[in-house]
Amino acid sequence: MEFPFQKVKDALQCFNRPIYETVILTLNEMIETGVLPPGTKFPPDKKLAIELGISHITLAKALNELRRRNILDRRRATGTSVPETKMLPEANKARKKIAVVFDYASEETFQQSLFLKLHQGLEQLNCTMCFFSSDNSSEKQLSILQEILNDFSISGCIVWSILDNEQAKKIIRMRPRYYPLIFLDRHYEGFDHDAVTYPNFDCGAAIAISLKRRKINSCCWIETRTKHDVISDVDRRNGFLSVWNNGRHFEILTLPEKEEDEMAIRIPRAGAYVCPDNSLALQFKRILQKHGELDGKRLFVIETPPENHGELKEFTAYKFAPDMGDEAIKILSSRLNGKECCTVSHSGKWSVLEGKNSTRRKFYDKPPFKET
């Protein structure tokens, strides 16, 4: 076939990287997606460099790197080509490495259904997980993602994003065109990228409507300093406040970071106490027990994996269904198989579990209560 000079030239414009890296990524993607099928003959290096408007030395260096990775065949007698068959069958059976970046990691992390779903899904795709923790720092997460995108041995990335819009913009622009980069729990409006999100804002609003229907007029929102700016918790709080109005009382109780400081905290009076995730609910329950104030409190939690049904039986739970990992793996698989367009999956239905002994579990795609 005739060598597609223009397609290669156009593809080179899609990357914001050094030319050497750009040539490697572009040709590798075009080979993997069949734009340059097996048997494609490359023109001589100097001619190709002139057509692409780059240095023939830089081009040769990139082509040699692709040969070293067994992606191209380069011989003095026959020139450069895409091999008809895989050059090293055993090497090509190597598992692809996929980076998984969480906002933070604790002992619980590796027992959570999200982590387990991702691990199982990657195993089914014959991929190896490379795990990273951002330690609740968006700057650290930005640095980790930049390193991942510069690591040619990593074939994709799934990230529980805590980036702000400007940080995300840098990463999305840096990402190679066909590179699987899937954001969890965050979709950045105005940018074309893959994402799987929980309906955090809507669920927060649904809780507020639920409390209003119960004739509750005062609410205490539970958080910690480190959780105050976590994006998913912020979205839930904003969703709640979008409905909680008309003179109803709202205050935030900031729990101490250290357990030894918990007895010094003053628990305000409120008609309801809302915890935006499991860990906060467990900590708040422990504090109430220490103060002898657990009985009689109306407690609510947006329950996320891992499940703590026994430990949180005093809470009315708005429970997310743990299907985010499955959705992320589906998108990753489609990307690895050559899908070009981005996918945004609004995952995470939720159910409402009311009362200590209730088994009622109805799943909702939209807020379960309408404003009246």
Image (cartoon, rainbow, N blue to C red):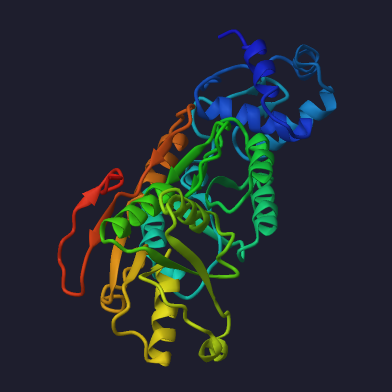
Residue 117, by quadrant, is: bottom left
Compared across the picture, whether 150 is left or right of 242 comes to right
Q: Position of residue 51 (x, y in %)?
A: 76, 12
Whether residue 42 is visible: no
- Which residue does the image show at 26% across and 56% down from the upper left? 213
User: Is residue 74 left or right of 181 when viewed as pictured?
Assistant: right
Q: Quadrant of the N terminus?
A: top right
Q: Position of residue 156 (x, y in %)?
A: 54, 44
Residue 202 visible? The answer is: yes
**Front residue of this view, candidates 326 and 260:** 260
Q: Nearer the viewer, residue 41 or 366?
A: 366
Q: Is residue 62 above or below residue 4?
A: below
Viewport quadrant of the C terminus: top left
Q: Is residue 351 above or below residue 338?
A: below
Give residue 208's position: percent from left, percent from top: 36, 55
List the single residue furthest toward the top: 2
Vertical comparison of 191 with 369: above or below: above
